[in-house]
Image (spheres, coloured by chain):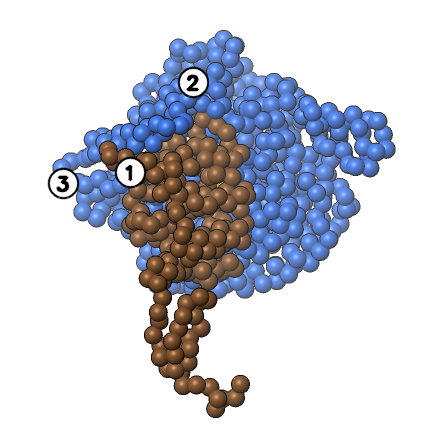
Chain colours: A brown, B blue
Amino acid sequence: MSLSSTPEPSRKPSAAPTGRPVSLTGVFTASLNKLVAWMQANSIWPLTAGLACCAIEMMATSASRFDIARFGSEVFRASPRQADLMIVSGRLSWKMAPILRELYDQMPFPKWVISMGACASSGGLFRTYAIVHGVDHVVPVDIYVPGCPPRPEALLDALIKLQKRIKSGSYVPAYARPPWKQWLEAPDR
Amino acid sequence: MDVGVQQATLKKLVSSRLGSLAESVDEINGQAVAEVTAVNLRPALSTLKESPELKFDYLSFVSAVDLYPRSPRFDAIYNLYSTQRHHWLRLKVPVAEEETLPTVSDLYATANWHEREVWDLFGITFDRHPDLRRIVTSDHWFGHPLRKDYPVEGRGAWPLGANVLQNIAEEGMADQADIASSEMGPARHITLNMGPQHPATHGVLRLALELDGENIVDCIPHIGYLHTGIEKLSEHHNWTQNVTHYGRMDYLSPMNNELAYCLAVERLIPDLEIPKRAQYIRVLMSELTRIISHLVWLGTHALDIGAMSVFMYCFAEREKILDLYEMVGGERMMTAYIRIGGCAADVPEGFEEAVQGWARDFQHNLDINHNLLTKNPIWKERTVGIGVLGREESINAGISGPLARAAGVDWDLRRDNPYSSYEEFDFDIPVETAGDVYSRYLVRMEEMVQAHRIVLQALEKIRETEPGTHVSRNYKYVPPRREDIDASIEGLIHHFKYWTEGIPVPTGEAYGFIEASKGELGFYLVSDGSARPVRVKVRGPSFSNLSALPRMVQGHLIADVVAIIGSIDIVLGEVDR
Ligand code: SF4
């Protein structure tokens, strides 16, 4: 394409996500639902809640080589009030369980949970008195990532899958599905 | 001096100094062990500590073994070391279920936390202990998990199912109430809770800080939020399987843990020779491990203090070593590469070039961080003179590794009690005297340089050994090679027995130790000749190092806590186990 044939910048149709109609005058038209979902999916802020070995891989995912910033999730928040995604990275002990739940409760809706690694998903190697055999006893999990520890690529894959679900607009988060739905709607909460 | 002669003289010396205080003094698997009664424990320890020839100034750990149904039921274990004379001694004190032991936390400050742990896990009471609370399990725990009658999966004190959430909600509330009631000081002080979810506590550590304005008056660390029950689980898996647990304990330096465990098991098996090649590979891998552990420390420590780019540089460098890990062990972190009898496999083709490729740039990459930090006025402002711990104080507090060396304790197990052929390597041990956060930084930075030196030497030495001798050929203890299974009936029998029965580790006890990236990492093992250990006690350096935190932070500002925690280089997986 030669330079002269390039349309004026303001007139150029911006590269839009597929399915979103764009007019040449620069005005977006989209269904609000989809637009919100699209924005949500591309700026998922995870909570800094490393538990064990898997947390080191989570850190590696956010560092130089794997660079989670490519997917808009580099903003790890220390405060649950500012986070959308809880990555439970590592084994959860019974002593820690109430705190994890408290953190989850403090996160604003909508929120998602990735259970990273064998320990978080099922207790993994450690079938002992001290460990919760699966964090889904404590928080509603949206995506389970296998591995001990999962490679950073696996975590990124989980993130992308979550983004896809959110973008689809029809995904019901785990907290709004049974059995967690009842807990959410219980009158004494 | 020859190690055997040394041990014999030590044994004689100990029995002459202790005299009638000791019931017996023995040598078990090349280590001196003295048995004393509970009444004589304190006098015996004072004698050992004061005696100028023995100088047992460092208490490595206090633990116990449940020997049910023996009567008396428990053996309490006190592991002593002399940082000047470099020798070890284990004291064994038989205790019945209803008996108590005197505390030794006034003789050795480090005993405080160790005794709490023994009380928590075994239910042995220590008289006059200043603060005998549970430490790794939660305050409302029921029973003592490391007793033999406690099931490994727990007693169901926490029923799974519908009421889990109810239970944990109550537990959470009780916890909050505890903070509010028990730890409040004078009225104008406020109590601030830090952690267990806090970006600067390096995991799930919780601190209750008592503040006067912004100054720290007192600090109570609460640990156990990552208590996994690894020691209990180890009693239920066989000797070979157990290797896999320990990489997951100190997950910043997995191979260090595997090495320490394997050395301890190998000490229990006198007829198991480790080929030189295997020893050199182990040295190489454990030095690489030291570097990745220090890199994570440096990255997160700097990140806590506000230097974001250092984190990125360190993790980029770490990735390169993880690639080497992956080459030898097939996994990025939990390789279980070091096994009893040697290593899981020989180093693959191209490994040498890969290590050399990494080594070429390493110094340059480390210099980037040096340039960013070492002379940086902000960095120095935040670290110089912060968190000072003196020489005597740190020995008394059971502190080892870079932390001790930063306080002027010239002690490194690689040099002073060499294992795995470390005596053949040429390296320096950096020692600083200030004992503050900055000198810990300097020590670790220099340690990485030295580790890099050792890696290159190990590479040379590996080249000189015969390929394929990465593991012992004693098929009683290592799985036979494929060729040997096919060629002979003995090979087949060994193979069958190895995988069905496990390895026959002789009855006895041993303590295997290494200088890990964080300090003295040791495994105390007791075997009754069966396929599973009776007791595995992990002496994690972070546990003792962390117990000195209150002394380091007192009088400092709250922002300094972050720098001090970073400088200790804790990893909670090892603190809580
Ligand atoms: S899944 Fe594996 S790596 Fe992750 S926390 Fe558990 S033991 Fe550690």
B525 lies above or below B208? above
Residue at point 17%, 40% (across, down): B189
Q: Quadrant of residue B257?
A: top right
Residue under numbered circle 2: B41
Q: Chain of mark 2?
A: B
Q: Amino acid at mark 1?
A: Glu
Check disc 2: other Cα within 10 Å, few if <14, some if 14-19, many if 20+: many
User: Of B308 and B266, which appears nearest the observer?
Assistant: B308
Q: Residue at horizontal 42%, vertical 80%? A: A12
Labels 3, 2: front one? 3
Q: Disc 1 or disc 3, which is closer to the eye?
A: 1
**Which residue is found at the position 19% from the left and 35% from the top?**
B185
Q: Spatial distance from mark 3 to mark 2, Cα to Cα?
A: 43 Å
Residue B501 numbered tag: none
The residue sitting at the left extreme is B187
Answer few, some or many: residues within 10 Å of disc 1's Cα (few below 14, many 20 plus, some between 14 and 19): few
Q: Position of residue A81 (x, y in %)?
A: 29, 50
Dot 1 corresponds to which residue? A185
- Marks 1/3: CA distance? 42 Å
Q: Is residue B278 left or right of residue B528?
A: right
Q: Secondary structure at mark 1?
A: helix
